[in-house]
Image: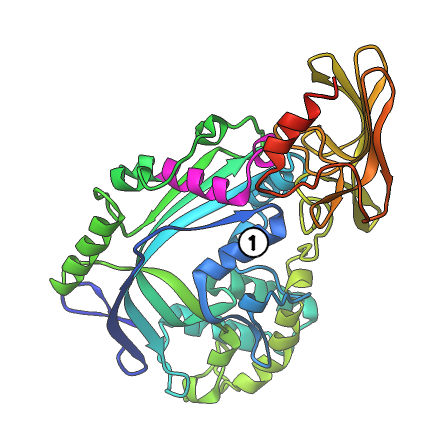
Amino acid sequence: MVKVNPAGHMKLDDRFVTANTQIKCDASWTSEVFDNFESYVNGKMKTSTMGFGIEVLPELSMNLMNGLVSNKFPPLFSRSWSQSNDVEKMKDFFKKDRGSITVSQATCITHKVDIADKSIKHFVDPFIDSVKSLHGVTSKSDKVKKVELKRFINEFGTHYGSTSEMGTKLLIERRYSLKERSHANENELKVCNTLAGAEVFGFRVEKDKGNCSNDELKSNTLNSKFAERMVVSTYGSFISNDLISWSKQVISLVQGNSFSPRVIKRELRSILHLFEDQNFTNLTDKNGNCMNISNVLKWVHPMMQDYCGLFELNCNSTGCGINDNCTVEEWCVEDVNDYYCVTKNISISLGDGLGYIGEVGSNLQPHGKGKEYYSNGNIKFDGHYINVLENILYNGKFHDGKFLRGTIYKDNGEVLTQLNGSTGGSNYPSFTDNNFSKIRLEYFKNIC
C-alpha cells in the first residue's frame, strides 16, 4: 500500500490513500483511573482508536465508546501482547495486588490519513504471496488451514487502519498500591499522577497548577512483583518548558514542513474487507491456478470469527481484579465462576486506647457493622460505619444528613443516644458535609 520515492523514502499511494493536514492540540492533560484489568484494557483501546473503534468482522461491529465487547474477539493489542508475560503481570497486579493504574496524556493531532473503501487497492508483494498461500490450502484439511491462517495473521494482523490520525503524544502511566488507592480519591490520583509526569518531562508550569500533598502518591517506589511504578511514553515528541509551549512548537514545525508525525489513533476495519475480487484480478496462486478470493473467504471468515479458539486464548477472563465492581473499601472474593464483594470481620486497635471489632474495608479501617470500645472494655459506639477515613470513627449510618442506626455510649457504659433505623427525630445532631468535622470535634469531646 506504499510506494518508494526516488529519495528512498516511503510514499503514500495516492490512488486510494489521501492525507490532509489538520492541527488540534490539547491545552491540558487528561487523566483516567483504572481499578480493574478490563477497564484498563478498554481505556487503552479507546485512546488508540477513533470513530467506531474496532470492527470485529465485516458484518458485526463493536463501539468502544458504549462499552460493547465481543465474546469471540480479543482486545486490540492481544495478538502481540496477550501471550507475553506483560499481560499476565498486569492481570496479577490488578488481581493479586488489587492495585490501580492512572493514565495521564496530552496529544497533538497534525494529520489525517484515509484509505478509500471503494477504490481498488494495490498491495505489496509479501501480502499478495500470503493471500496466494491461503488460496492454495482452500481444499486442504482444517488443521492445515489453521496453520496457514495463523501465519498470515501473525504477519499482517486482523485489521487495517481505514482512517488514521497522526501527530505526537505524551503519556504518563503510574501504578498505585491498594493502600495508596484507599487513601486517595480519583481527583487526587489524577492531579498527583499528572504532576509526577510533568516533573519527568521537565514541564515546570504544570507542576504549579495542581496541589499534590500526598507524599505516597508522589513517591517513585512501588512494592510490587508485577508492575513498575511509572511508565512514560512519547510518540514522535520532544521536551519543552510546558504544555502550551509544546503545542506551539508542534504547530510551528508542521507549518514549516519540519515535523514527522506518528500514528496516534486509528479506526480499524477487518482485514477481510481487502479480500475483494477487484483487488486480486489476473492473479494466479502458487500452483498456477486463477485465484478465486471468494473461495478463500468462505473458510477464512468463520475461522477468524473464532479467533480466540484459533490461537487458544482465554478471551473471557472474569473475576476479582479483572471485571469486578467492588468499591475501594470492599474485599473481592471469588466463588467458582463468579465473585462477590464483602467486608471482613476483625479486631483492630484504633490508637489512643480505643479498640474496634467488626467489619473492615480493604484499607483495614472500620467499614460496615462494628463496635468501638474504650480501653476498660466498655463500648463507645455500636453501629454501622461507612467509608471511615482519616480516623473519623463516629460516622454511623446516615440518611439525608441524619444519624440513622446505631448506639453511642459514654465511657461509663451509659447509653448516650440510640436509633434503630427510623429516619425520624433524634437528640443526635444533624450532620452535613459542611459541618460534620466541626460538630464531631465539639460534640464528641463531651462523651469522654
Rendered location of residue 201, percent (x, y): 29, 39
Q: Quadrant of the C terminus?
A: top right
Tell which of 248 and 149 is nearer to you. 248
Q: Is residue 215 above or below residue 261?
A: above
Q: Which residue is mark 1?
A: 41
Q: Nearer the viewer, residue 349 or 378?
A: 378
Which quadrant of the figure contains the N terminus? bottom left
Q: Quadrant of residue 334?
A: top right
Residue pictured at 56% horizontal, 79% vertical: 58
Main SS of residues in magenta? helix
Mark 1 burial class by Cα count in 10 Å: few <14, some 14-19, many 20+: some
In this picture, residue 314 sits left or right of residue 4: right
Q: Write down the region rendered in magenta.
A: 178-197
Determine whether 344 is above or below 350 in the image.
below
Q: Is residue 20 visible?
A: yes
Percent position (x, y) of residue 206? Answer: 30, 42
Left or right, 262 with respect to 284, comes to left
Which residue is at 69% across, 46% downward? 401
| Residue 143, quarter of the rendered image | bottom right
Percent position of residue 15, x then y: 28, 83
Residue type (three-letter) at the residue carrying disc 1: Val
